[in-house]
């Protein structure tokens, strides 16, 4: 889709003249067709990321570790834009973005996290977030194996890379606690 930034030139027939696309004009068909795997990935990852944001929001008043607080800020900074992008993508393919229904971390575990403080909170947060990130990497792997949409595959690759790095960091942080 043409945006309002730099002009997009659409070539004409051979020997003919081109034209400038209008802002918002659709520029043809995507090379890849959206598959059920692409939709399933976005519809699963949005609530999954929302749960991570909910967990990260618990950190500032409960954590005793600046390192854990910084991690929570990074998680929030990475996952909010991914939620927005996947929500927009789902709408662009005619789907309604899902509500909040992820159960990687159970309600009982979330309640334990809400009541924990200090070092106990930090250990529980890191343990739960490692499992949460591992589930996201698994979901992204399914998209990379079965999906075809370029945008969703790129998102899955970003999730795999970024959350893989964070898993390694969190394991080291957990060892130091």
Image (cartoon, grey):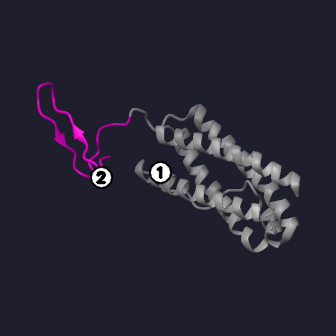
Q: Which residues are magenta?
A: 1-30
Magenta region includes residue 174 = no
Closer to the chain start, of discs 2 and 1, is 2
Find the residue positioned furthest to the top.
14
Q: Secondary structure at mark 2?
A: loop
Q: Secondary structure at mark 1?
A: helix
Percent position (x, y) of residue 120? 88, 65
Crowd band around label 1 with a 10 angstrom C-alpha radius: few (<14), some (14–19), many (20+): some
Find the residue positioned furthest to the left.
16
What kind of secondary structure does the magenta stretch mostly adopt? loop
Q: What residue is drawn where x is 52% and y is 42%? A: 152
Based on the displayed image, in which of its 4 quarters is residue 19 positioned?
top left
Q: Name the residue beneath numbered marker 2.
A: 5
Viewer-proximal residue among 81 and 83:
81
Q: What residue is drawn where x is 84% and y is 54%? A: 174
Crowd band around label 2 with a 10 angstrom C-alpha radius: few (<14), some (14–19), many (20+): few
Q: Does 151 sit above or below residue 14?
A: below
Q: What residue is drawn where x is 57% and y is 45%? A: 40
Viewer-proximal residue among 74 and 92:
74
CB under 8 Å between callouts 2 and 1? no
Q: Is residue 101 visible?
A: no
Quadrant the C terminus occupies:
bottom right
Q: What residue is drawn where x is 70% and y is 45%? A: 165
- The answer to whether 140 appears left or right of 33 in the picture is right
Percent position (x, y) of residue 139? 65, 42
Percent position (x, y) of residue 57? 68, 68
Q: Name the residue beneath numbered marker 1.
A: 90
- The answer to whether 19 appears left or right of 69 in the picture is left
């Amino acid at each position: 889709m043409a945006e309002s930034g730099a002009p997009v030139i659409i070539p004409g027939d051979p020997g003919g003249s081109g034209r400038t696309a209008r802002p918002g004009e659709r520029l043809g068909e995507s090379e890849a067709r959206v598959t059920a795997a692409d939709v399933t990935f976005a519809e699963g990852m949005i609530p999954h990321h929302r749960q991570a944001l909910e967990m990260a929001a618990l950190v500032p008043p409960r954590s005793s570790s600046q390192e854990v607080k910084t991690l929570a800020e990074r998680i929030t900074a990475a996952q909010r834009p991914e939620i927005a992008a996947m929500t927009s993508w789902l709408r662009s393919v005619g789907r309604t973005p899902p509500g909040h229904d992820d159960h990687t971390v159970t309600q009982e575990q979330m309640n334990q996290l809400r009541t924990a403080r200090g070092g106990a909170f930090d250990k529980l947060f890191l343990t739960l977030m490692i499992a949460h990130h591992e589930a996201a990497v698994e979901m992204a792997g399914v998209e990379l194996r079965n999906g075809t949409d370029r945008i969703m595959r790129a998102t899955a690759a970003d999730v795999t890379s970024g959350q893989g790095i964070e898993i390694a960091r969190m394991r080291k942080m957990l060892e130091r606690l």
